[in-house]
Image (cartoon, rainbow, N blue to C red):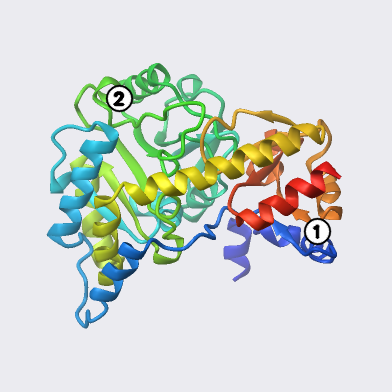
Amino acid sequence: MSAVSDRLPTFPWDKLQPYRATAAAHPDGLVDLSVGTPVDPVPELIQKALIAAADSPGYPTVWGTPELRDAITGWAERRLGARGVTHRHVLPVVGSKELVAWLPTQLGLGPGDRVAYPRLAYPTYEVGARLARAEYVAYDDPTELDPEGLSLLWLNSPSNPTGRVLSKPELTRIVAWAREHGVLVFSDECYIELGWEADPVSVLHPDVCGGSYEGIVSVHSLSKRSNLAGYRAAFLVGDQAVLGDLLEIRKHGGMMTPAPTQAAVVAALADEQHVREQRERYATRRAALRGALENHGFRIEHSEASLYLWATRDEPCWDTVGHLADLGILVAPGDFYGPAGERFVRVALTATDERVGAAVRRLGA
């Protein structure tokens, strides 16, 4: 066990517990804006699809049902502008975090290989490299990296935690650079449905990739767009050679999306109305929280997309966490996402309207 612990960083969320206790002691209760976990109901049509598939006694396939693959290919063409996507270009996964954590291992990376990810980033990119015993490096601009030994490049647009969106020219330049140097690109696009002040673009858009998916894979999740975090529903779209290899490895590992979840995903990807309704909820909460934070003396940077506001009072992040905890509001310290976030906090939009209203009142008091 100690050998495993030495390979992994301390689980960051444990450090928040004292602040959670302080915030929970507020007379009006805790407002938890720390973790981006959905709180709104799973849309009824998705619940019905899950229930209808509840009698699933046999093993599901790792590749998913033909209906699921049809749903993913159709959505990728409609929503991402991808062209010529076939079943060979898609692969369901058991939630995107599992994929991020185990991808370097499944790709066969190890000592001597390098994995790169944004300087401000979801910590699981680093964890995945550590689990594979690969080297890891954070970047500001990936095209400035030394490509020697660089085997996997993570992009994240819209970004968690900052909400920054990479423009179409930026993505085009990065994809061209990666192909020139033989670097595999995985683009985490799990927040692509949640653009506010920018319209996020996928690496699969023909203007970015030139109509070829060679060397690129995009990662998508239904946790945010459809409130399916509890279903563990995500999928990959891109290079068929890469996904073919991953499919064989995942077959050996038994990494199967449960059959009822597969049926739920088919229903979710076929319906856009529930996505629009959920976007409206988040947009309302975002406007209320942003205004309250700014009036309270915060500055918001980036945050043009995703489920978070990247906020600062130009002080150490833990001081800000403590200040908000005294108001009964729990947020995530920016240094969870790398040293560059040490003067920021991440404020999630994932609280009920009532709890967001409570936070707004407290910030205005």
Residue type of the residue flagged with mark 1: Tyr
Of residues 218 and 22, the one drawn nearer to the viewer in this rendering: 22
Task: Say which label, 2 or 1, has the lower sequence index.
Answer: 1
Is label 1 in a helix, a strand or a loop?
helix
Question: In the rendered image, which residue does mark 2 sit on?
Answer: 179
Question: In the rendered image, which residue does mark 1 sit on?
Answer: 19
How many marks are shown on the rendered structure?
2
The spot of residue 133 in percent (x, y) is 49, 51
The answer to whether residue 207 is seen in the rendering is yes
Residue at 82% of width from left, 38% of height from top? 316
Labels 2, 1: front one: 1
Judged left or right of residue 104, residue 87 is left
Residue at 35% of width from left, 20% of height from top? 172
Q: Residue 51 appears in which quarter of the rendering?
A: bottom left
Near mark 2 (Cα within 10 A), the count class, few <14, some 14-19 or many ≥20, is some
Which image quarter is the N terminus in? bottom right
Judged left or right of residue 360, residue 275 is left
Of residues 106 and 219, the one drawn nearer to the viewer in this rendering: 219
The spot of residue 343 in percent (x, y) is 77, 35
